[in-house]
């Protein structure tokens, strides 16, 4: 099991997750613009199966809306993982992060390059 901590302060994104290499499970916290989301999902390792040439990650989760605790904000992250000599040596992630507020209706999308924090 590895602990990955990456972020991009300029984009307001911070990722702090644990991964399980035996089954690809990932869980932890994704912070977007100061809002902390509990997230879970999967990652796949390049070379782990024939034809799998890129390491990818997909996470989803939710957080309480700051203005209306009963109205969640949903989040999704999807992207590619870069390693130096394999897991757990993550050198970066190229990701898309998307949020949707059930309180305000705001939809936010960000493309970002995350680096080890």
Image (tube, rainbow, N blue to C red):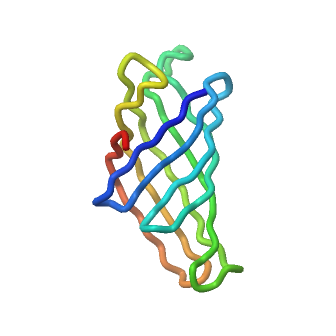
Q: In the drawing, does residue 44 fall left or right of residue 113?
A: right
Quadrant for the N terminus, please: top right
Instruction: Please give the name of the residue rendered at 61% of the width and 38% of the height, measured from the top-left corner.
Output: 42
* Position above or below: 89 against 60: above
- Marks counted in the figure total 0
Residue extending furthest toward the right: 70
Above or below, 6 against 65 in this view is above
Residue pushed farthest left? 10
Q: In which quarter of the image is residue 91?
A: top left
The quarter of the picture where the C terminus appears is top left
Of residues 34 and 73, which is closer to you in this image? 34
In percent of the image, x 49 and y 37: which residue is there?
A: 4
Is the residue 112 above or below the residue 5 in the image? below
Q: Is residue 109 left or right of residue 113?
A: right
Residue at the spot 68% in from the left edge and 27% down from the top edge: 23
x, y percent for residue 88: 48, 25
- Name the quadrant containing residue 62: bottom right
Q: Where is residue 78 in the image (x, y as percent from the top left)?
A: 48, 47
Q: Residue 102 at x, y = what percent?
A: 61, 78
């Amino acid at each position: 099991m590895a602990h990955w901590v990456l972020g991009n302060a300029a984009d307001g994104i911070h990722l702090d997750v644990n991964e399980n290499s035996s089954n690809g499970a990932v869980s932890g916290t994704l912070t977007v613009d100061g809002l902390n989301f509990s997230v879970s999902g999967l990652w796949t390792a390049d070379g782990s199966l024939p034809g799998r040439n890129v390491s990818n990650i997909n996470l989803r989760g939710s957080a309480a809306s700051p203005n209306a605790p009963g109205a969640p904000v949903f989040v999704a992250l999807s992207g590619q993982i870069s390693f130096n000599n394999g897991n757990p040596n993550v050198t970066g992630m190229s990701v898309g992060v998307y949020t949707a507020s059930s309180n305000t209706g705001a939809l936010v999308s960000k493309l970002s390059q995350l680096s080890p924090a």
